[in-house]
Amino acid sequence: MRLTPQFNGERSDHDRTCGYGTPENHCGKPATWHVLWTVDGTNSLDCDEHMADAEKQWVFYGRHRLGPHCLHPEALFYEDRCEVPGGPRQVDLTVREDAPPWLLPEGLSR
């Protein structure tokens, strides 16, 4: 009995589609999950449907929602994201409607 699925091999750094299936016939839907199957770094990208299937039949080491750094060759896998060491962190900024103009980021106006 296998604990992890068969893998399709290497993927392009720009391929953000679900890799479930065979190299000749894989899902191809937009991926939403980044799954770490083994501690040595075997990983895949999966859509919601195939992540639900994977949860039922395979053992994985970790997973998180697919983010901007997930396919970077130097990225480190964390529980909730991938991050490039020493790289800039992604920050989401929300400005309240009633915020004074001097609080607005440079170049942003209402």
Image (cartoon, helix red, strand yellow):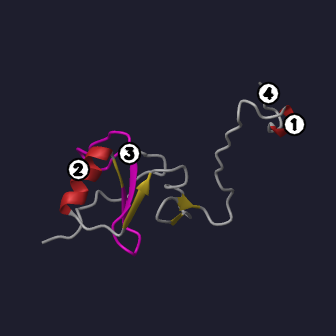
Closer to the N terminus: mark 1 or mark 2? 2
Q: Main secondary structure of the magenta part?
A: loop
For marks 1 and 2, give the CA distance: 53 Å
Q: Which mark is residue 74?
A: none
User: Which quarter of the picture shows residue 98?
Assistant: top right
For marks 3 and 4, give the CA distance: 34 Å
Residue 22 shows in the view: no
Q: Which residue is mark 1?
A: 102
Closer to the N terminus: mark 3 or mark 4? 3
Residue 49: % across, % down: 26, 45
**Residue at the far left in the pictured view:** 1
> Which residue does the image show at 48% across and 46% down from the upper left?
14
Neighbor class of circle 4 (other Cα within 10 Å; few <14, some 14-19, many 20+) is few
**Residue at the far right in the pictured view:** 102
Q: For this rendering, which residue is in front, 29 or 61? A: 61
Q: Which residue is mark 2?
A: 21
Q: Which residue is mark 4?
A: 109
Closer to the N terminus: mark 2 or mark 4? 2
Residue 74: % across, % down: 56, 64
Closer to the N terminus: mark 3 or mark 2? 2
In which quadrant is the C terminus drawn? top right
Residue 66: % across, % down: 45, 50
Q: Which residue is mark 3?
A: 31
Magenta residues span: 17-44
Local secondary structure at mark 4: loop
Local secondary structure at mark 2: loop
Task: Say which of marks 2 and 4 sits in front.
Answer: 4
Local secondary structure at mark 3: loop
Closer to the N terminus: mark 4 or mark 1? 1
Give the residue type at disc 4. Answer: Ser
Give the residue type at disc 3. Answer: Ala
In which quadrant is the N terminus drawn? bottom left
